[in-house]
Image: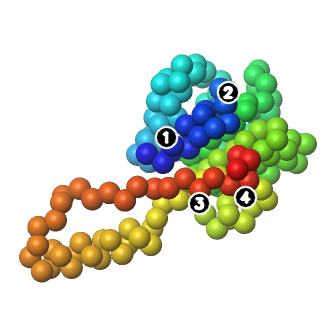
Amino acid sequence: TAMRNLVEHFVHEHKATDIHFVKGVDGNEDAEARFRAYEDVLRENNIPIIPERISNGDFYITGAEKAADEIMNGVLPMPQAIVCANDVTAITISDILMKNGYRIPEDVMISGYDYSVEAQNHTPAITSVCSRFREIGSYACEMLLKVLDGEDIPKDNYLPDEVVFDESCGC
């Protein structure tokens, strides 16, 4: 998955071994999959999963503000990277950290998910996962036309998301 590729990027390209994860809404399928990708990559690279390096977010500003407070005022030092379950969380945490004197990506790298216009235009631009909605819509229309023409199509169709490496991770 793209989230897996993103976490692997921090581990392999940036040599990060201290990575904080800010989750999305509990029970949300996408949020849970993103968190599992983080856990899987850490396990596969023999990086300990530390409970204090996981914050419960909510995909919104309020959850991001709480997570930023936990990161800045927790018992552990600032992590090397913060992986967020969405762009709103990444932007909010980035802004709070910068207001408190931290430099992104020099002091801490940060990433999001959604590749929103806000993330693309943020300073620094947020490394994020791009869901290819336009391509998905086009592909869905193609599949619908095939069904209407009586063609058999695969039951499961998948267009993978892509990671866009940007300024907030130093790329």
Instruction: Identify the colour scheme used.
Output: rainbow
Q: Residue 115 carries which label?
A: 3
Cα–Cα gap, marks 4 and 2: 22 Å
Name the residue carrying label 4. 125
Dot 4 falls on a residue whose secondary structure is: loop
Residue 158 lies in what quarter of the image? bottom left
Residue 111 shows in this picture: yes
Camera-side residue of 154 and 62:
154
Q: Which of marks 1 and 2 is nearer the N terminus?
A: 1
Percent of width and height locating residue 110: 70, 44
Q: Do the residues labelled 4 and 2 touch (CB within 8 Å)?
A: no
Crowding at mark 2 (Cα within 10 Å: few <14, some 14-19, many 20+): some
Q: What residue type is labelled 1?
A: Arg
Q: Earlier in the sequence, mark 4 or mark 2?
A: 2
Crowding at mark 1 (Cα within 10 Å: few <14, some 14-19, many 20+): some
Residue 16 lies in what quarter of the image? top right
Name the residue carrying label 2. 18
Q: Do the residues labelled 1 and 2 touch (CB within 8 Å)?
A: no
Name the residue carrying label 1. 4
